[in-house]
Image: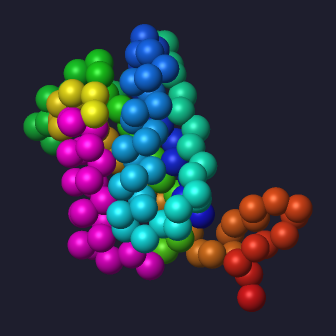
Amino acid sequence: MPLARIDLLKGKDAAYRQNVGRVVYEAMIGVGVPEKDRFQIINEHDADNFLFDPIYLGIERSNDLIIIQVTWNDGRTVDQKKAFYKSIVDGLVQAIGIRPEDVLINLIEVRKENWSFGNGIATYAG
């Protein structure tokens, strides 16, 4: 079960935000996440609460920056992760016209027993 947190500055309409979520979900499916396993939180922030370096590592970011953080089970290869990053960026460029420089992605990998889908049960624990 991945959990995607998507953060951006306030001011984008609902269709824009929904397209971002859709692209992230489709990229997850592309690296083996089961269909219907969609849990996303999309947060909008005032500029005072969305701080980033506009030129870190020589990448020029604008106020259109989207930060995507995905928590999911460990076990994917580096190549799968690279394909995941590329799929998100390519999909967002096509869907919303964002610049690739304005997409920051972070993965958090956890062991399967760290999830409870409900009812207080460690769903994947052996």
125 relative to 6, above or below: below
- Is residue 80 on the magenta stretch? yes
Q: Quadrant of residue 77?
A: bottom left
Q: Residue at x 60, y 49 (%)?
A: 39
Q: How is the image coloured?
A: rainbow
- Judge by depth and name the residue closer to the eye, 43 or 21: 21
Query: Where the C terminus falls, by quadrant?
Result: bottom right
Q: Which residues are magenta?
A: 75-94
Residue at the location (21% across, 36% down)?
A: 94
Looking at this rendering, what residue extends furthest in the bottom direction?
A: 126
Image spot of residue 46 (x, y percent): 49, 13
Please tell me which residue is depicted at 53% across the width and 62% down the height of the picture.
35
Tell me the chief SS of the magenta region: helix
Residue 109 in sight in this render: no
Q: Position of residue 29 (x, y in %)?
A: 42, 61
The image quarter containing residue 20 is top left
Vertical arrangement, residue 116 with respect to residue 55, above or below = below
Task: Please tell me whether residue 103 belongs to the stretch shown in magenta.
Answer: no
